[in-house]
Amino acid sequence: MWGTWWVWDARLTSVLVLFLIYLGILAIWNAIEDQGQAGRIAAIATLVGFVNIPVVKFSVDWWNTLHQGASVFTLDGPKIAPSILIPLLVMALGFTLLYAALQLAVMRNEILRRRLRRLAILAASDAPPLGAPALERGARA
Amino acid sequence: MSFLDLPHIGFVIAAYAITSIVVLLLVAWVVRDHQLLRRALAAHGPKAANLSELEAEPR
């Protein structure tokens, strides 16, 4: 136990930076109205932000930190007790599956949303232009 | 000695509780969004279920 809620440790700080990058990408995606442009800029920000991933991974090796060094994926095998390792791996698998399921569900929702938007555009294009007189069938213009 | 006497048990329970609430809210949000979208599509009639059929229709 570290005995503290927060410390400017290399691992904690690099994960904080990752979290801030993630919030920035969400902000970009929501701030720009044109979805195509928002997608392009968010994709570039994601690629730039991905640089931080190896920094998070190797932060415990590069700097002298409170966090322990690599203890799961090492050349000599896991260094942590099975009573912690097994729940850790089960939870990692569980959250990965949850992520995949939610991702698929959100993609399905996005398809429906786009279908709805398309229907609204089709309905609007069939409607008479604003200000045009509504003509009865057979009436003279 | 019950599990409530374990060290840091408050932190462990709080961590599991907050995670459970966040995951449940996330799932509920996605399910609710899906229901609202389905309802909105149903308001456009049965053709709304198949957009390709709708687009093939002569105008």
Image: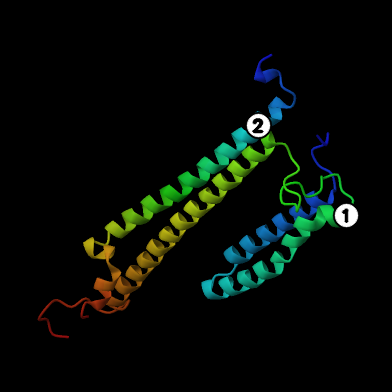
For residue A7, side relative to residue A32 (left or right): right
Dot 1: element = loop
Q: Is residue A139 above or below residue A14?
A: below
Q: Report if residue A100 is visible in the image.
A: yes
- Residue A95 or B48: which is nearer the viewer? A95
Find residue A7 and name its label.
Answer: none
Q: Tell me if B45 is positioned left or right of A59 in this view.
A: left
Q: Is residue A2 above or below residue A74?
A: above
Residue lying at 65% horizontally and 35% vertically, measured from the top left = B15
Query: What chain does badge 1 belong to?
Result: A
Furthest-right residue in this view: A64
| Image quadrant in which the C terminus of chain A is located | bottom left
Along the viewing direction, whichever of A89 and A127 lies nearer the viewer:
A89
Location of mark 1 (residue): A63
Determine whether the residue tagged by mark 2 lies in a helix, strand or loop: helix
Residue at image point 81% right, 48% down: A69
Does any portion of residue A127 appear in the rendered image? no
Number of other residues with Cα within 10 Å of mark 1, as a class: few under 14, some 14 to 19, many 20 or more? few
**Callout 2: chain:** B
Residue furthest out toward the front: A76
Return the residue at label 2.
Answer: B14
Q: Nearer the viewer, residue A36 or A134?
A: A36
Q: Residues within 10 Å of mark 2 (few under 14, many from 20)?
A: few
Check whether the beta carbons of the residues at disc 1 and disc 2 lie within 8 A of each other.
no
Q: Amino acid at mark 1?
A: Trp
Picture quadrant of residue A49: bottom right
Residue A68 x/y as whole percent: 82, 45
